[in-house]
Image (cartoon, helix red, strand yellow):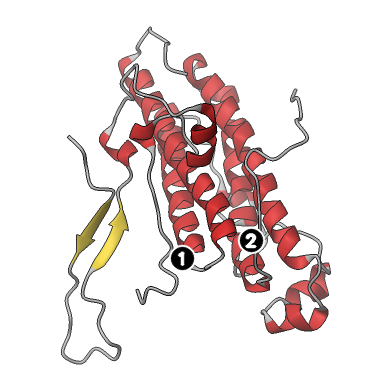
Amino acid sequence: MSHPQEQTWVPFIGPFDPCPPILCKTYSTPPHLFMTFQPPNLPQFSPEEALRHGTLWPALYSPYESRWGKGR
Amino acid sequence: MWVYEKKLQYPVRVAKCDIRMAKYLAEQYGGADGELSAALRYLNQRYTIPDKVIGLLNDIGTEEFAHLEMIATMIYKLTKDATVEELDAAGMGAYYVSHDRALFYQNAGGVPWTATYIQAKGDPIADLYEDIAAEEKARATYQWLIDMTDDVDLQDSLKFLREREIVHSLRFREAVEILKDNRDQKKFF
């Protein structure tokens, strides 16, 4: 039961829109949204990896990449 | 009381001289959903929330101050060596007139921080729902800040802070579950 970390949707494109349309919009859906209560005994990162990821649990890790320079 | 550790929660490196980002980062320093608002909101709500979740508000409220320090460090690094001409060109001329290069609690648009950003309703569910919303809004703010820069070092620290918002949001959601079911077991934090 792995859930996508990002959802996409297609906005309405009008015939008289002034700017080139962005055909596909995205939004973030991090894993905590699908976890009302964190289950016990989940696998853990090593201390060094946990610091780097910002969380002790891989199941809670959510990557995010900058949109800068990607034309969206 | 608090015990202070003279180090940041996570390293802050800024690779690129980009004064524009200092202005944008102010959103998380003195903005409505920024770290100051978060810290003061949670630490204040501690007093009137059921015992079971006081510790959670205490821990998260304290961590928000650690995040505030990280944001302050970013803003300071980005502005400390900027000339007045550079500040003016980056849209911080008015800021310089008011504050020189001192840090000030205001949002990215220059609006000063106000206590009206935070609420203490006294109803535990209402307060925790506000906290969850605040965490999600802060997560979104970090996303838009990451979007606004190509400095990978700055992005790295901001990604850490974004992940912390996710963990905090889950903890507040769990607090709601604890209070609404009145669970007796306390094994999670």
Which disc, if any, is residue B26? 2
Amino acid type, residue under disc 1 in the picture: Asp
Q: Where is residue B165 in the image (x, y as percent from the top left)?
A: 47, 42
Rendered position, B181 above or below A7: above
Asked if disc 1 and disc 2 are in contact, CB closer than 8 Å, the reply is: no
Chain for disc number 2: B
Residue at horizontal 59 percent and vertical 51 percent from the top:
B116
Alpha-carbon distance for marks 1 and 2?
Answer: 15 Å
**Can you identify the residue that label 1 sits on?**
B147
Same subunit under labels 1 and 2? yes
Residue at the image point whose x is 21% and y is 38% from the top: A2
The quadrant of the image that shows the C terminus of chain A is: bottom left
Residue at point 33% right, 21% down?
Answer: B180
**Mark 2 Cα shell of 10 Å, populated few (<14), some (14-19), many (≥20):** many
Instruction: Tell me which numbered mark, 1 or 2, is placed earlier along the sequence.
Output: 2
Instruction: Kindly identify which chain the residue marked by label 1 belongs to.
Output: B
**In this image, B189 relative to B178: left or right?**
right
Q: In this view, does B154 lie above or below B82?
A: above
Indicate the quadrant where residue B171 lies. top left
- At a point 33% along the width and 23% down the height, the residue shown is B177
Q: Is mark 1 on a helix, strand or loop?
A: helix
**Residue B33 in view (yes/no):** no
